[in-house]
Image (cartoon, rainbow, N blue to C red):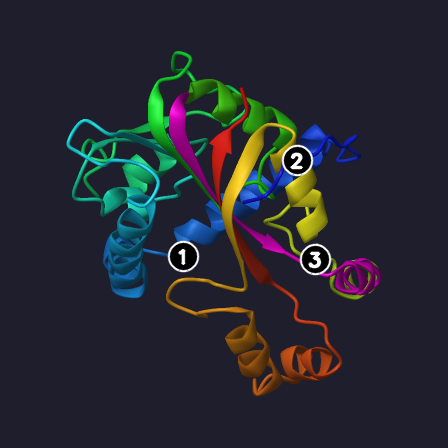
Amino acid sequence: MQDAIEYKMEIKKVSDERWDIAQKSEKEYWITYTTESLKKELGDLYSKKASILLKEWSKWIKLNKNTKILQIGCGPEDVINHFKIGKKYSLDPLAEFYKKRFKFDYKESGLMEGMGEKIEFPDKYFNIVILMNVLDHVHFPEKVLSEIKRVLKDDGIFYFENFIYQKNFIHIAKIWGKFKKIFTGKMFNIHHPYMFTREDLKKMLLEKFLIIHEDLGKDIGFYKNMKELKKSKRKNKRLMIKIPAIFGLYGIINYTSICKKLN
């Protein structure tokens, strides 16, 4: 269990222009998929992950047909579409686009258009809130976490996942990004307005939550732990991944935590 610590935050909100660029790129990304191709590529993965998560969560919360589960930034399909228990709700800024583009049962997953910075539900409404690789996409990360705390029941759990990067990797990526923009005209990491370190995320989380469990490197369907991630990247055939990994720079690393709200 992680003790709560007070921090002064230094995470700044990205500009409206940068967030709009990320949203446009997100839509362009999903246009490359059809309902069938999404089911083929991600359906089994999300189904497996949903089952694993429910089993893990049962250690900290009692699950039943009345458990209210919210996933924020769910995309066109995610684990929320595969839970076999509870009352499901999902929120995404591109919800109406997904409903027009794809043929999933969005009534079952409770999909509605909205942003994590303003969750249109009463205080202490949900038993479980899920935020999976979304915080680096949002406009104002700290506001999203504040809203999650507000709508989470006192005895509820907050399941959090996000990609992190080592500080040295971020420094190199910023330099590389400038060269990429000059020579290709394309923005580096366009989908993600933010690149966080583990320390960045924990500072934000610990202002509002108590971390009761965490994992580094574990990414269900890809890596079991940090050791497996390191081994895989060092053996990767792509030199842009393999060479940095040999020198201890691993690029994207998945960080996971299960949290309780601070009163």
Relative to 43, 221 lies left or right: right
Q: Magenta segment, which residues? A: 153-175
Q: Kindly identify the amino acid type of the residue bearing the numbered disc 2.
A: Met
- Mark 3 vs mark 2: which is more N-terminal? 3
Looking at the picture, how far across and down is residue 142, in whole percent? 64, 29
Q: Residue at x 61, y 44 (%)?
A: 136
- Mark 1 vs mark 2: which is more N-terminal? 1
* Alpha carbon distance from label 3 to label 1: 19 Å
Looking at the picture, how far across and down is residue 77, in whole percent? 32, 47
- Mark 3 vs mark 1: which is more N-terminal? 1
- Report the front residue among 110 and 15: 110
Where's the N terminus, which quadrant? top right
167 in magenta: yes
219 in magenta: no
Check disc 3: other Cα within 10 Å, few if <14, some if 14-19, many if 20+: some
Number of the front mark, 1 or 2: 2
The residue that mark 1 highlights is 32
**148, above or below 250, in the image:** above
Looking at the picture, how far across and down is residue 87, in whole percent? 21, 29
Q: Quadrant of residue 36?
A: bottom left
Looking at the picture, how far across and down is residue 135, in whole percent? 57, 40
- Report the front residue among 141 and 67: 67
Relative to 101, 182 lies left or right: right
Work out whether residue 48 can be spotted.
yes
The residue that mark 2 highlights is 204
Q: Kindly identify the amino acid type of the residue bearing the numbered disc 1.
A: Thr
Residue 229's disc is none
The residue that mark 3 highlights is 188
